[in-house]
Amino acid sequence: MPARPSLKRVPRATFLGRAIAGNLGALIVGVKYFIDPNRITLLYPHEYIKLRQGYRGYIVLIFDKCISCASCARICPARAMKMVTMEVKDKKLNRAMKKKYPVINYNRCIFCGYCVDVCPTEALYHVPYHDLVYLNMQDMILNVEEFQKEPEFVTAKEGVPVTYVFDEKRGLVKVSVEESSNQGSSSQPAGGGGSS
Amino acid sequence: MITATRVLYDIGWGILHYIIFYPPVYQFVIIPGLVAALVVVIFIIWFERKAAARVQMRYGPLEISPRTGGAPQLIADLVRYMMQEIIVPSAVDFMSYILAPNMSMILSLLPMVAVPMTSIPSYWPIPMSYSLLIAVALSTLSPIFVVMMSWASNSKFSVLGGLRESFIVVAYELIAVISLLSVVPLLHTFDLVTIVDYQFSGRWLGLLNPLALLDAFIAVLMSTSGFPFEIPDSESELVAGPYTEYSGLLYGLNMGGAYIRRWAFSVLIALVFLGGWAPYRPEPGIVLGYLVPSLIVVVKAVIIMAIMSFLRAVYGRYRLDQALSLAWEVLIPIAIAAFGLSVFEAFIGVHP
Ligand code: SF4
Ligand code: SF4
């Protein structure tokens, strides 16, 4: 995928031109990649894509910041977020009172991020990964305690973080995260990075 | 004691010489027959996956032993095929259902009895004077059993697959026969040894008659349903072509059978067009006169097969009508042209 696609003219008008130039062109491309492969497949458990800041992954609640306004539950288009009533001890008034806090049902959540955006006190935030596995559907409905913990990112324990960068000549190439940060920039690395 | 060891040595030598190195046995069982064919097939299937993966930006088999590029994957597949239950549907014609894959496998190796591996007459499996003709004739036998498999399966999908197979068979056999035999008017012989001997001059018949080489190459691809002619058993549209009702090791036999047919043809092409054991002159002795030349032929044939496997990465699959029109409208005229080229070369005196 070059940045500016340029049309290549191959003499394919006549029958012989089609048969010879077409086949030769295909073979040359094949040999080129056979000698110098550009493998972009993600070997998933051994490698994983290091997602950038701002990725809408799983959502975590910061309990102390939440003011129980329920905006998040109201805006949720999938009805994944609900408010539940909890007994908490109010610090100022120093007495037990009932307050509402959000919980989330990942069976329904579509990771649109509206809840995070709408929260007035920034009590919700995304973690930049989403590839988690639950053993059953019940586990995907979190309660308030679970909602406050960042989910464990098991893939990161054994996998190597990689990222895809765009190269002028080769198209997409896969580089490990360290290499791409060595090249200096995060969003638009300029060329190079020929490892695969 | 000395006599005892002497006798043992004689027995051992006798077994080695008269059983293992007895030409028909050696040729059919060891090189280039069953043992070599199995090793080559396992290597080639692995290579095919890896080559296609490299070209198509993938990795290919890697999970078992990543350091060797997943090379033991094929052994694992073989074990899996052997463990699988063979399910025989109740509607099939039992005898032909079981026999056809085995016969097809054996018959695909049969051309091996007619190919010489050395120019020393005592190591020839059969008299050589019509060996090219015999090898070509034997190589056209095994597709019959593919059609028989589809018929015995008693399933409409299998019959459709068998029909497609027979279309292809009728098309490619003519091409293969004409293009392989087109060396005959040039050298005035059906004898594969003479054909190889002529190529010691450095004038390989593949260079003298590239049209015939190209044609034979494409015909082999068609006959063994290699890409881009993987038409009879195109798994994404037809269930599995003629092999729909087969499972377990019987299916493995079918899959391996195509590769073994390709192997037999590759050996034949290596002998006829690429000089056989050409740079090396066989000397007396089993190792120098028999083993070494056969290894040279094997290496050449493996290179041909590797190129064929590489094509899988480049081409997409043809439709049946495209393949047939390619065969009847393009390849057969080319084959006849190759024949004419040979006649012409014989006329202007390239002939020895
Ligand atoms: S991310 Fe979207 S769907 Fe998920 S809980 Fe928030 S608002 Fe609802
Ligand atoms: S929008 Fe924020 S502050 Fe309001 S209930 Fe939800 S998490 Fe709490």
Image (tube, coloured by chain):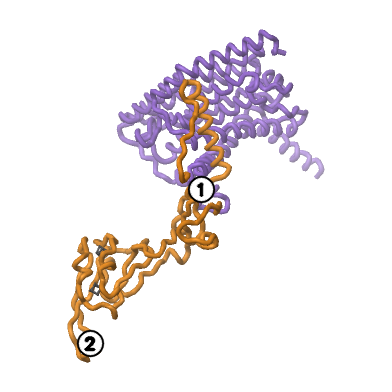
Quadrant location, ligand no. 1: bottom left
According to the picture, the residue beneath numbered tag 2 turns out to be: A90
Pointer 2 or 1: first along the chain: 2
- Between B157 and A23, the one nearer to me in the picture: A23
Please say if A190 is above or below B83.
below
Front label number (2 vs 1):
1
Residue type of the residue flagged with mark 2 = Asp
In the image, is B316 to the left or to the right of B122?
A: left
- What kind of residue is marked 1? Glu
Where does the N terminus of chain B fall, quadrant-wise? Answer: top right
Query: Residue at image x 53%, y 23%?
Result: B139
Residue B137: give x, y in percent of width and height. Answer: 54, 18
Q: Classify residue B91 as left or right of residue B170.
A: left
* Colour chain B appears in: purple
Q: Which residue is mark 1?
A: A168
Q: Which mark is residue A110?
A: none
Nearest the camera: B202 or B133? B202
Q: Chain of mark 2?
A: A
Q: Secondary structure at mark 2?
A: strand
**Quarter assignment of residue B316:** top left
Residue A116 image offset from top left, x and y in percent: 28, 68
Q: Residue A141: x, y in percent?
A: 25, 67
Badge 2 local density, few (<14 within 10 Å), some, or many (20+)?
Answer: few
> Can the viewer see residue B82 in this picture?
no
Q: Position of residue B238 (x, y in %)?
A: 35, 33
Taking the spot 41% from the left edge, 61% from the top edge, the residue there is A51
Q: Which chain is orange?
A: A
Do tags 2 and 1 sit on the same chain? yes
**Residue at x 64%, y 34% (from the top left corner):** B299
